[in-house]
Image (spheres, rainbow, N blue to C red):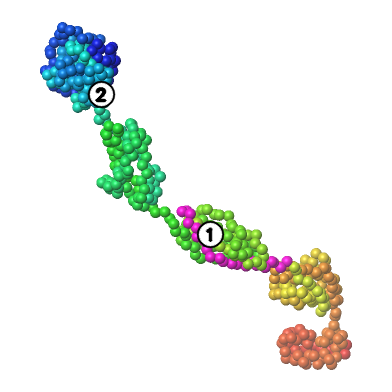
Amino acid sequence: MRLKRIAKFGFGAALLLALIVGGTLIAQRHNSALASACTTPATDYGQVSNLSVNIDTAGTYRIWTRMAAPDTTNHTYLLEIDGSTCFNVGGSSVPIYASGTTTHFANNSSNWIHVTSSGADVSLNLSVGTHSIKLIGNAPGVVLDRLIITSDTSCTPTGTGDNCITPPDTTAPVISGIATGGITSTSTTITWTTNEAADTQVAYGTSTSYGTTSTLVTTKVTTHSVSLSGLSPNTTYHYQVRSSDAAGNQATGADKTFTTAAPPDTTAPTISSIATSGVTTAGATITWTTNEAADTQVNYGTSTSYGSSTTLTSTPVTSHSVGLSGLTPGTTYHYQVRSRDPAGNLATGADHTFTTAAAGDTTPPTISAVASGSIDATSATITWTTNESADTQVAYGTSTSYGGLTTLVTTKVTNHSVTLNGLLPSTMYHYQVRSADAAGNLATTTDKTFTTAAVVTYPTGDANHDGHVNILDISLVVSKWGQTSSLGNADINNDGKVNILDISALIPHYGK
């Protein structure tokens, strides 16, 4: 489109020339023009000849003039194109202005003329290139101020004729960047862009028939966004974006789909199998299960107000275990397990209790009445008592290093007795008694001593070991007569039985 303002024309106001190169071309040549240059009228009412127009596309163009006439007789002017074609523009259809008026043109289509005085269209087939235009006044008082040359014959100028100066827009917007975002179980947002400002709408539904359209947003924009709501959870939707530009050209996007999210999880986990184990004086282990993976935490304290909580274990699991520590011995604790699933639904268990173990026994037994007795040349018996039940053991030897240790008797008693055998005659022995209670607290005495007896030699036949062989020894042998066990010294000949042979062995020593 090229516009050129020309100098004031002698029979009218300043003239604006416009060319429209878009629109539909007309192939028909009209015979309304004279196939020669215009003849200069006898009375010259003014001429303008320094006008030109450049044609980019060859075709038939219609020429409109906004003009007015003083009366029904004086109502034409001559239009010459390229010095070879002449139109007598105007005639009875030209509006008449009132005498003396200063307003010649109303802003409506009645002032626009596109015919000759004979009523034929002012149209001309123009080739590509520059064409000269000449306007010649041939009647007094005729005024004109605009001339439009257009290939769009469907357009009738109004007002200043700008509606025909702009070629009609027949191209739909170009849609790109279609996307969905923020998908939930019941909503999503559709976005796209257009290469020109256009309105906004989305058709959507569960099939390519769609069935529902969003509210048309008529505000023209290039960046589009539509929020869809009230959708069904876990459902695949088809959608198509739509945008129409200011000229009404509509673009539609290809069919696209999205799937809404599953319904939100609003159900808390189910807690079961709550249990307490490993209770000590200062700790315990709490376990439970949930029917879905969830986090792990325990509230605990000495009342149902709890007051303390374990560190939250955020990893979702179904089998839960929490160790409590730093507890007070011999104390009843309340606790409540807690598990929250990934959707944030919290389940809490009922109040439960456990009691820590009493404080441990750290006091060893008290040992008293330590004594050594029944001492002979090779053995001795050690006795003692404790104030509580405890086990029994003696360390002994010929020095304070001891070196010997009796077998530990783990049976817990308060009266203790240990016989030491295999000792050396006439030897002083050191010993220490030892007793540990059920809690493992060990008591030991200071070092103590005893001395074994010397070895005594008795005459042969001295069965009762009184140093003499007499009737008393014969009586002892007779009391054991025929026996093979518990013989003591009655078995004079050491053959394992008491009989006449022992009497025979005793008689030679009788009276000694």
Q: Which residue is drawn at 83% across and 91% down?
A: 472
Q: Where is residue 475 in the image (x, y as percent from the top left)?
A: 81, 92
Q: Please say if the residues under marks 2 and 1 sit with CB atoms less than 8 Å apart.
A: no
Which is more toward the observer, 347 or 23? 23
Where residue 52 sits in the image (x, y, percent)?
24, 13
Q: Nearer the viewer, mark 2 or mark 1?
A: 2
Magenta stretch, main secondary structure, is: loop
Residue assigned mark 2: 106
Q: Residue at x 88, y 90 (%)?
A: 511
For residue 6, side relative to residue 83 (left or right): right
Of all residues shown, which one is farthest toward the front?
A: 100
Residue 17 in sight in this render: no
Q: In this view, does 327 lie to the left or right of 386?
A: left
Q: In which quarter of the image is the N terminus?
A: top left
Between 412 and 261, the residue placed more toward the observer is: 261
Q: Which of 450 and 510 is in front in this view?
A: 450
Q: Position of residue 320 (x, y in %)?
A: 52, 59
- The answer to whether residue 357 is magenta is yes
